[in-house]
Amino acid sequence: MTPLRRQVLDELQLIGRATQTQKSYICFISVFARHFGCCPSTLGTPHVREFFLHLRRIGRQPATLKVYYAALRFLYRDVLHRPEVMQGVPKPKVPRQDTLPALTHLEVRSLLDAANSPFDRAFFSLMYATGLRVAEVCAVQVGDIDRANHLLHVRCGKGGKPRTVPLSDTVLDLLSVYWRVERPRHPWLFPSPCNVSASCTDPTLRWADAPITTRTMGRHFRDLRETAGLRRLATCHSLRKAYATHLLESGVDLRTIQVLLGHARPETTAIYTSVSAELMGRCPCPLESLG
């Protein structure tokens, strides 16, 4: 490990960045260094600008460019203490999709009904029922479930912040059925599957000693969307957004939703709680009231 890589990793751990964030930053900074074939400490603004032009030419998406920008800004501002390097580099703009209506209750139901395995149905049902991020659901351990008090303890929240969310009887019953059928391997509630027959009942053979990955569940959700015939854009994160929106429509106050989602700022929660297409469809037309 190079001294700079060690320095970046130490600084990320010191400020408590999530493990996935650490991996992304290290990876993207390494790509930047390999592109020029030298240590980033010897590079400056012209090199960073050239690098971003290269990323655009090879078709990197705006969301990816945004992470590259965050990683390099962290490198030059917080590690190398040269903030002026990034001041001359425009921050990539990501097209916002927050104005799109949230999934309707019917769309969520069709997605969950399309799940052809107890694993997918339990995973995505838990995500919608609690508003957890996909990475948070992947990291749930069996011991995090407090059945007596109908609670789920989220130990691996974004930024390392723990929180607690409620679990209804319906969710607990669904998880119980899933547990009896799939027999996931401890300690993970949703472990990665091994390459063995689905009829295998031995959890030490069927399940790996590691949680399912977010990338795998992203692929599962895309399959689910196709099976359900959902035409508009939706990702795993759409279930979290639908959770927030549907709570707001049912009368839950914004502050409570903020706590349940684990947001530090109410402004972030306000972005999530868009008006659903279902509610839009029930709005009266002013023209019809003219007679």
Image: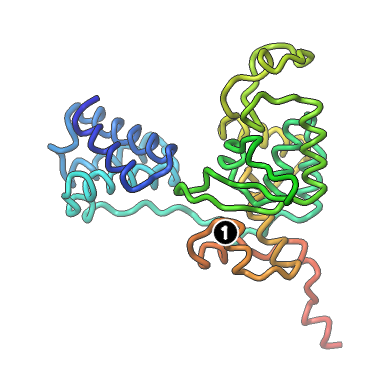
Which residue appears farthest toward the bottom when viewing the image? 290
Give the vertical position of 224 relative to 195 (above or below).
below
Quadrant of image for the N terminus: top left
Query: Does residue 268 appear to the left or right of 56 in the view shown?
Result: right
Q: Nearer the viewer, residue 265 or 93?
A: 265
Give the vertical position of 176 relative to 16 (above or below).
above
Classify residue 188 by image quadrant.
top right
Give the vertical position of 12 relative to 205 (above or below).
below
Q: Position of residue 39 (x, y in %)?
A: 17, 32
Q: Nearer the viewer, residue 284 or 122?
A: 122
| Residue at 66% across, 35% down | 142
Q: Position of residue 41 (x, y in %)?
A: 15, 38
| Residue at 77% across, 38% down | 175
Query: Does residue 272 appear to the left or right of 21 in the view shown?
Result: right
The image shows a total of numbered marks equal to 1
Is label 1 in a helix, a strand or a loop?
loop
Query: Does residue 123 appear to the left or right of 64 in the view shown?
Result: right
Q: Nearer the viewer, residue 91 or 41?
A: 41
Which residue lies under the disc numbered 1? 98
**Amino acid type at image mark 1:** Asp
Q: Nearer the viewer, residue 50 or 188?
A: 188
Which residue appears farthest toward the right when viewing the image? 291
| Residue at 23% across, 43% down | 48
Q: Position of residue 193 (x, y in %)?
A: 65, 21
